[in-house]
Image: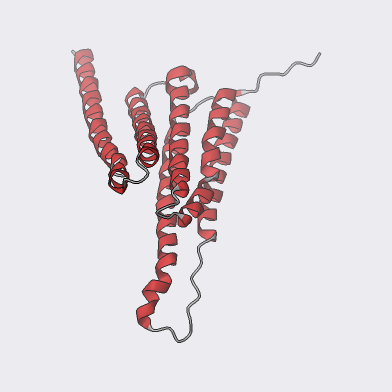
Amino acid sequence: MSVIKEAKPAHREFELDRAVLFSDAVFAIAITLLIIEIKLPHMPEKAPVADYIQLLNPFLMEFFTFAMSFLFIGTFWKWHLQLCRFLQHYDDGLIHRNLFFLFFIVTFPFSTASIMHIGSHFMLPLYIYLFNLAGCLAGLFWISYYIFQRKPGLAVAGLHMEKELLYQRLKYSFLTMSTGFTIITMAYFIFPENTSVQKISFFVIPGLIFFNHFRLKIKKRNTLRLVHIGDKSSSS
């Protein structure tokens, strides 16, 4: 009977590096694919200058969507990098959660391209895009919960304040997007003819982002105060 030997620490570290590098490659490919579909429109030779804006409107919209998606993927990569900074070990549970997160990173070029087909009576591309954002944030929060709450042994020792603040940031970001996505979707299904309610629902996500921004600042201030009190008590 064959026995699988436990990998040596150096081999485990190499395997962890491979997992991180694989994730970085997925991010790089997804960002590259965002720009592939963007092309300058055909400009008629004798088109007046006044018509340039109208001819360039689709291109400008595509570029704006690309820039917005680039910003989102870049932010997700930064948070993923911050999570990886705390890792010292890994297991199958972490790999599965990371693959779940990367699935939504891979689908980002598709959801970005689909949003160009949005219309007043065709909102499916918007739902796809928001669902993609919520899926990415769900994956990041799931990873952070697994590392910091369920399997803290996977993370390096110490740095409790940094871990808690990152965990809270990812939790609030996921709750913000999932709540906003749910409210926007319900507004269109419950009030299909009421455009005022539908437009108001779009302000839910910015409002929650603003609220959670200050909530995190208060959380950080309170955490720093507790650390400062602990340092003073230990020194005395």
Q: Nearer the viewer, residue 203 or 172?
A: 203
| Residue 91 visible in the displayed image | no
Q: Residue at x 44, y 27 (%)?
A: 144
Q: Is 151 rendered above or below residue 112? A: above
Q: Position of residue 40 (x, y in %)?
A: 49, 70
Q: Residue at x 43, y 83 (%)?
A: 47
The reply, left or right, for residue 229 in relation to residue 168 is left
Q: Residue at x 26, y 36 (%)?
A: 213
The reply, left or right, for residue 184 in relation to residue 124 is left
Q: Residue at x 40, y 44 (%)?
A: 75
Q: Position of residue 31 (x, y in %)?
A: 50, 51
Q: Nearer the viewer, residue 97 or 60?
A: 60
Q: Position of residue 167 (x, y in %)?
A: 37, 28
Q: Quadrant of residue 214?
A: top left
If the image is split into quadrants, where does the N terminus sit? top right
Q: Is 61 rendered above or below residue 128? A: below
The reply, left or right, for residue 70 in relation to residue 2 is left
If the image is split into quadrants, where does the C terminus sit? top left
Q: Position of residue 41 (x, y in %)?
A: 49, 71
Q: Nearer the viewer, residue 220 or 118?
A: 118
